Image (cartoon, rainbow, N blue to C red):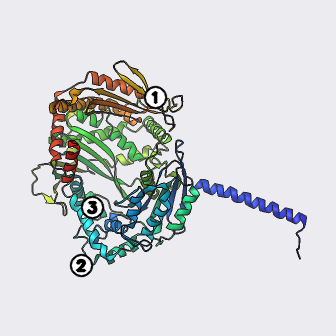
Amino acid sequence: MHIGTPKNARTQMLTTNVLALLLLIFFSGFTMAAQTPDKSPNDNNEYRFIELDNGLQAILVSDKDADKAAASMNVAVGSGDDPKEREGIAHFLEHMLFLGTEKYPEPGEYQQFIKSHGGSHNAFTAFRNTNYFFDIQANYLESALDRFAQQFAAPLFTAELVDRERNAVHSEFSAKQKEDGRRFYSVKKATSNPENAFHQFAVGNLTTLENTEDNPLRPDLIGFWKARYSANLMTLAVYGPQPLDELEAMVRARFGAIENRNLKPQAHTSSLLNKDTLPAKVTAEAIKDVRSLSLSFPIPSQQQNYRTKPASYIANLLGHEGPGSLFDVLKKNGLADGLSAGLGMDTGENATLDISIALTPEGLRRQDEILSLVFSYIDIIRERGISQQRFDEMQRLARIDFRFREQGEPIHEAMRLSSQLQDYPAENILSAPWLMERYAPEQYRAILAELTPDNVMAYVLAPQLELKSPKLTQWYEAPWQIETLDAETLKANAPKALATALQLPLPNPFVPENLDMVPGKTMSKPELLSNNGMAIWFARDTRFNTPKANVFLSLRTPAARVSARSHVLTRLLVDSINNNLNAWAYSARLAGLDYSIYPHLRGVTVRVGGYSDKLHTLMNRILMQISTPEITRQRFDIARQNLIDSLQNKAKDRPVEQTSEFIQTAL
């Protein structure tokens, strides 16, 4: 017997159900909005942030036009987590995770699957993070994710493969023993604060990864994995053409199986440099003909300041290359060939702000004067460099770059997003690198307060040094020595003529004002506009909705390669042109324009690209310099020496690099 519901009661129930449904839709929409990161207006991808029940966080990217898919897992565990008795074990674990899981026990099965479907894979271990990544043909993403997730959920750490991978890690270490970059890095580690894990050997070798009956490696490996790896320390990025709901289903079904051990990331509270030893200068011997001076200042971690970026504000001034800048003055006086400034390592507790200068032979001889000149320029920034106008310019350029940001390859986007998800909230993961929300003079001054002569470690790297009783780094045997600096002397050694030439950057004349697109649809093929002695080709492409242009001007002449001497002379001429343009054109680079002038088999090419509004101004100035280049004896001597150094350094490259270049040249 059917018992009916009274009409008014049914109506009331229907109304209640409709209201409940509307509320559910409203709040679901609100939740979804909260889970969607702020993105560039030029970005047509769809994004969704999710957190699994096991604490793993993931960012999903749906790009309907992608022909490849990619994924990256970032684990908040790195070489800084290595126990002192097992240096390199985080790197060794990175190797072992690839070699078989409970569901896919065959070693190399994952690699073969990726390779056989048009993909690539790799991983790297940094100080605080380990990143695993792959790309693959888009329709094989789900199967690849199934294999990828198992590496973190149920790795086998097969005993028979331990020695094989120990040797692989050792080979990686051995291949870099004669590389100046790795050797210099070992010197920085040796002179860092022994209480900070950065001081330790990060790569690992057969000694630190000893595997004997008395000291078996596999139990230590499994113990490290259980003590450090946990789902709540993992951030995942998955990029593909599939809809977001489909990507989410793929992720939830597979990555939810990773165990959440409720671990916390390792805290590195000790300063990276021992402040009791500062100020000091470390001198290290290079194998190749390279000369550099680097300054490292301990500062507080800047991770929490990503919305205001005070370190970027200061580094922008320190690394400026315009007229009167520190680099411009050094270069005009034949002392330096390059300069960069920026945040060094940031452990989440402590960081460094670094200035790196590529020296000429004369600059190496006058390194003490350069050190003092750096502090003279910092004083100028401290006194006159903090201004609202300067911030407004930097903020405008950052907003323009974010507005017209162009997408990279899926694998690079996945790696970037999985890493950034460790450092930024989900809503800012796409915009964080470009955020400059407010003028923050108090934060700028706080950093400048640390950039003092009594708070610096200077590093000099050069070949054929006459070091007195040098020490050798433990694993790379790089010779080095350390000496105490006098803070008062650092202030007083700057040559007066050079110090008075220093000045802060002027307002940037290249900041784009007109950001409109050129009218018309994308052309199916280029058009030849003129051929009266000079072929002019034009192609309009508006598919990417970005007001940027590229101009290539190829000056073709057989004189560029008619002989070895003409080839050298062409390179020296191009060096002079680039040198004369650098100070004037640096502001153009900051404003989203870039250029390159380079010799090749058929002559010399000029390329100018970026926001089209001021592009013609830059091209005109380049052509004026090409037509009447200024060639000084000082610059000629420096360029000639650089060319000699680069040729001699080729003989010191690894055999595989020398062989590869020889084959290409012969072909």
* Amino acid at the residue labelled 1: Asp
> Which residue is denoted by mark 2 in the rendering?
212
- Mark 1 — residue? 613
| Secondary structure of the residue carrying numbered label 2 | loop
Marks 3 and 2, how far apart at CA: 31 Å
Q: Position of residue 560 (x, y in %)?
A: 22, 29
Q: Amino acid at mark 3?
A: Asn
For marks 1 and 2, give the one nearer the viewer: 2
Pick the front one: 423 or 657: 657
**Residue picked out by circle 3:** 193
Q: Position of residue 623 (x, y in %)?
A: 32, 24
Of callouts 1 and 2, which one flags the residue occurring earlier in the amino acid sequence?
Answer: 2
State whether residue 574 is above or below residue 164. above
Q: Image height check: is 286 above or below 313? A: below
**Which quadrant is home to the C terminus?**
top left
Answer few, some or many: residues within 10 Å of disc 2's Cα (few below 14, many 20 plus, some between 14 and 19).
few
Q: Residue at x 32, y 40 (%)?
A: 319
Cβ–Cβ below 8 Å for labels 3 and 2? no
Quarter residue 324 falls in: top left
Query: Element at badge 1?
Result: helix
Above-or-below relation of 340 to 36: above
Q: Earlier in the sequence, mark 3 or mark 2?
A: 3
